[in-house]
Image (cartoon, rainbow, N blue to C red):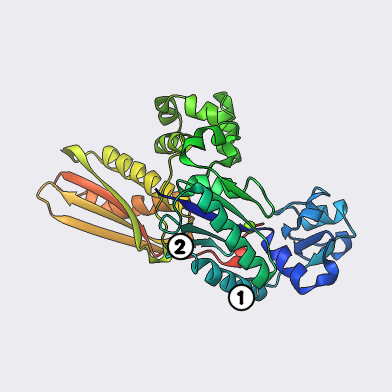
Amino acid sequence: MVIIMHIDMDCFFAAVEEKHNPEIKGKPVVIGADPKNGAGRGVAATCNYKAREFGIHSAMSITQAYKRCPTAVFLQPNFKRYSSTSQRLMKIFKSFAEKTQQVSIDELYLDISNKVQNYQEAKNYANRIKKVVKKKEQLNCSIGIGPNKLIAKIASDMNKPDGITVVPPEEVHNFLSPLPVRKLIGIGPKTEQKLATLNIRTIEQLRRCSKQTLLNRFGVWGGYMHNMALGKGSTAVSNYLKRKSIGKQRTFDEDTKNSEDIVQLLYTLAEMVHAKLTERKFYFKTVTIVVRFADFDTRTSASSTHIATNNINVIKESINKLIHPYLHDQRKMRLVGVRLSNFTQKQPEQMLLC
Ligand SMILES: [Mg+2]
């Protein structure tokens, strides 16, 4: 039986600050730009639960946060402190499973399939982990347990702070059904709005919608969303920096020289690799295209950006540039592919989290 665990620290930055400045404990704490008595610029990176009671949330402008609670403790982020704490935490977590995958400074997946027999034991295992973290680091985390990473991730968010949520395979549908579609990974405000125009607001409604309707409306991404609504997700737990590339290739039904068809297929492949990319929270620097001609002559061509990105348009622009010389070849094409590589982890400074 596959059992995946997702661990997420509770209000990580704020909790680390509270630990180092015990006098601020119990007060609303906002980490981010200097509010300068209401004249500051920039945003709140994160805040604790007490601050949230005042309506403050991450990514809010710091002046707005100041307006809502001028007496809050405003701190500038100390990334060195967060990252050294994170390293110690990850060491603890990794001692509980051989297969782990860190996804951000304060989050990781554990494959505990070979550590426990069933979901009840998994819950006990989660309790043990939480106890060790509390004892060694005086910090709280929330843990989700499920049959794949998607379910584990959504579950860890259900009983924050300091919670454990267990979703065995037979409860996946009931668990997901009432939740808003936004809970699914990759569904942001824009997709949420588009789904609402189809009268889809909950995951149950998304599941009941025909896959074809979603494919027609959203392309490959629609099929992907439908799979998530069914509770399907990846069970591959491995540290992503070890993963060297994400690629897809397809053979044409019939060898072709039609530029439009070629570019269209490359765009579709781009969307597929991009969906994988966002699922794994990767940022890439290099786009490679593969072209195989009818005589099986196979060429690859790559381009890289200076800064890692997860922007689909960068993939498509690279495709336009890279495919251009091949479109002038006399031969027909048999297959094309798109590959992303050169992955990096986003810097903690760029992350907004809680
Ligand atoms: Mg967190």
Residue 65 located left or right of residue 121: right
In this rendering, does residue 352 appear at all? no
- Distance CA(mark 1)–CA(mark 2): 19 Å
Q: In this view, does 223 lie above or below 289?
A: above
Name the one closer to the observer, 59 or 159.
159
Q: Do the residues labelled 1 and 2 touch (CB within 8 Å)?
A: no
Which quadrant is the C terminus positioned in?
A: bottom right
Tell whether circle 1 marks a residue whose Cβ is less than 8 angstroms from ligand 1: no
Residue depicted at 68% across the width and 55% down the height: 162
Residue 175 horizontal/vertical position (percent): 56, 36
Residue 263 horizontal/vertical position (percent): 31, 43
Q: Is residue 91 above or below residue 217?
A: below
Give the quarter of the image for residue 158: top right
Residue 131 horizontal/vertical position (percent): 64, 64
Give the quarter of the image for residue 51: bottom right
Q: Name the residue under label 1.
A: 84
Question: Between tags 1 and 2, which lies in front?
Answer: 2
Q: Mark 2 points at which residue?
A: 100
Q: Earlier in the sequence, mark 1 or mark 2?
A: 1
Residue type at the position of mark 2:
Thr
Residue depicted at 41% across the width and 30% down the height: 215
Residue type at the position of mark 1:
Ser
Determine which of the numbered discs, if any, sits on residue 324 in the image: none
Residue depicted at 56% across the width and 50% down the height: 144
Residue depicted at 90% across the width and 60% down the height: 71
Residue 66 located left or right of residue 204: right
Q: Is mark 2 on a helix, strand or loop?
A: strand
